[in-house]
Amino acid sequence: SQEMMKELINKVVAEAKLANSSIHGVSHWKTVERNGVYLCQFNAADIEVVRLFALFHDSKRENDHRDLEHGPRAEIYLRTISKLVPLNPDQFENLCIACRTHTVGKVAENITIGTCWDSDRLDIGRVGIKPHEKFMTNEEAQRIAREEDFQILDDFAFEGII
């Protein structure tokens, strides 16, 4: 239900050390959600997993620098609160894999996991790094990176959950 989702989001935000960070905080999570919802129009990725990836992927960061363990920590956190996460077991596993490996993954075989990563990677410009198409899974994400067409994301209107 929407009420349960709201409670889950409030919990994750309240328990995220860097929720207010301009780099890895809620503003970034919202952008990742927007990017993911946009990309889901172009492929068969699971939008529920993609949205929840946006919420969880950086929720267990300890700092805004090199914190390579934050993905695995997000998975551990997810598993401790799994009853609160409105996904079936297969979806939940994809979410865990996407979170655990988003800092180390190259290009995903799985379209849902790849779309999670693409939605995050398309926002890397916020730290002064240009997204590169060779690290994207989806053709539309590759095109956006290649053509630097970030305006299409900025213009995309959607109802966010975060």
Image (cartoon, rainbow, N blue to C red):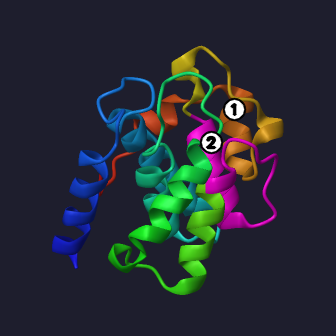
Q: Which mark is residue 125?
A: none
Q: Is residue 57 above or below residue 24?
A: below
In percent of the image, x 25 and y 56: which residue is there? 11
Task: Answer with left or right where residue 42 lies relative to residue 126.
Answer: right
Q: What x and y, as percent, mark residue 27?
A: 34, 34
Residue extending farthest to the left is 3
* 17 magenta-colored: no
Q: Amino acid at mark 1?
A: Ala
Residue 81 falls in which quadrant of the image?
bottom left
Query: Is the residue under label 2 in contact with that under label 1 (CB below 8 Å)?
Result: no
Q: Magenta part of the protein: which range? A: 100-122
Where residue 73 sits: x, y (%)? 54, 51
Magenta stretch contains residue 110 = yes
Disc 2 marks a residue whose amino acid type is: Glu
Residue named by callout 1: 145
Is residue 130 shown left or right of residue 81? right
Query: In front of the other: label 1 or label 2?
Result: 2
Category of crowding for the residue at label 1, using alpha-carbon neighbours closer than 10 angstroms: few (below 14), some (14–19), many (at least 20): many
Spatial CA span between label 1 and label 2: 27 Å
Can you see residue 69? Answer: yes
**Mark 1 or 2, nearer chain start:** 2
Q: Does dot 1 land on a helix, a strand or a loop?
A: helix
Residue at 54% over, 32% down: 123
Question: Mark 2 — residue?
Answer: 69
